[in-house]
Image (cartoon, grey):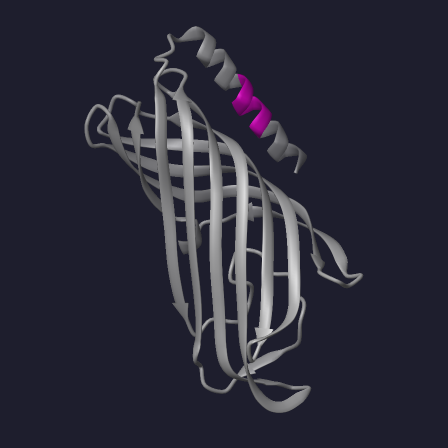
């Protein structure tokens, strides 16, 4: 973790040095990206990226499960120079997991399970474009974000549990830009390396724990498509 923070500090310092050495373009960028994912016959975890590990052991007798997530990330940023961009980003995600006719080992009756989640975050990011003069650009995107997550669990439409979590996330993402014209760009953003640290709780109980993770996050849920326009 310390090494990861040192890497981010070095990147930020390099960014400031480059910004002073090169002429700023003083142009603003308005953009956004989205991710939509549907999975069938999935293991009943959280419908978003976090999973508290609370609950029993489930067995699905029908293989009829569905996990749906949608995320949108609008942002505004400013070009510092040909390589660097600084910005402010919102991150909103919703998810829904449904499993029908489940069997729990502690109970003989079949029941339906649904988990509904929503997450909102705000953060700062920078972007370093490796080849800004080309039509297709590769970039690295260090970021810092604060998130709040709420998840409700229903058994046969009855609310049985509500969980809340808040966490910070530090990371470095990867991406590709395609310059449609002088003002518009198409974007493809992927995951990379990230560190998460936060706290979750089960509402109206004494259950509350800290959690953290560090590693790569390259998967379908971290691929975002979008557009941005220079203002």
The verdict on residue 222 being magenta is no
Location of residue 127 by image quarter: top left
Residue drawn where x is 69% and y is 86% of the image: 106
Location of residue 207 by image quarter: bottom right
Q: In the rendered image, which quarter contains the N terminus?
A: top right
- Number of marks in the rendered image: 0
Q: Is residue 17 above or below residue 57?
A: above
- Considering every residue shown, the one lying at the far right of the view is 206
Residue drawn where x is 34% and y is 13% of the image: 25
Q: Is residue 76 above or below residue 45?
A: above
The verdict on residue 10 being magenta is yes
Q: Is residue 75 left or right of residue 184?
A: right
**Start-end of magenta stretch:** 8-13
- Where does the image place residue 226, in percent across and percent down from the top left? 32, 41
Chief secondary structure of the magenta portion: helix
Q: In the rendered image, which quarter contains the C terminus?
A: top left
- Where does the image place residue 46, in percent across and percent down from the top left? 55, 63
- Considering every residue shown, the one lying at the far bottom of the view is 108
Residue drawn where x is 38% and y is 11% of the image: 24
Q: Is residue 227 above or below residue 203?
A: above
- Where does the image place residue 66, in percent across and percent down from the top left? 43, 71
Residue drawn where x is 45% and y is 13% of the image: 18
- Where does the image place residue 159, in percent across and percent down from the top left? 62, 72
């Amino acid at each position: 973790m310390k090494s990861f923070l040192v890497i981010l500090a070095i990147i930020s310092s390099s960014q400031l040095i480059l910004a002073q050495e090169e002429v700023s373009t003083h142009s603003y960028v308005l953009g956004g990206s989205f991710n939509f994912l549907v999975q069938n016959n999935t293991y009943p975890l959280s419908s978003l990226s976090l999973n508290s590990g609370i609950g029993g052991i489930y067995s699905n007798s029908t293989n009829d499960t569905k996990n749906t997530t949608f995320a949108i990330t609008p942002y505004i940023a400013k070009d510092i120079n040909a390589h660097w961009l600084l910005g402010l980003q919102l991150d909103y995600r919703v998810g829904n997991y449904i499993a029908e006719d489940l069997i729990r080992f502690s109970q003989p009756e079949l029941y339906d399970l649904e988990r509904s989640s929503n997450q909102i975050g705000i953060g700062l990011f920078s972007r370093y474009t490796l080849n800004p003069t080309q039509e297709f650009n590769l970039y690295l995107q260090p970021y810092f974000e604060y998130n709040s997550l709420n998840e409700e669990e229903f058994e046969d439409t009855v609310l049985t549990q509500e969980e809340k979590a808040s966490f910070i996330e530090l990371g470095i993402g990867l991406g590709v830009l395609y310059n449609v014209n002088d003002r518009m760009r198409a974007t493809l953003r992927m995951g990379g390396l990230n560190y998460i640290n936060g706290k979750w709780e089960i509402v109206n109980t004494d259950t509350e724990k800290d959690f953290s993770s560090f590693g790569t996050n390259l998967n379908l849920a971290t691929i975002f498509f979008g557009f941005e326009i220079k203002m």
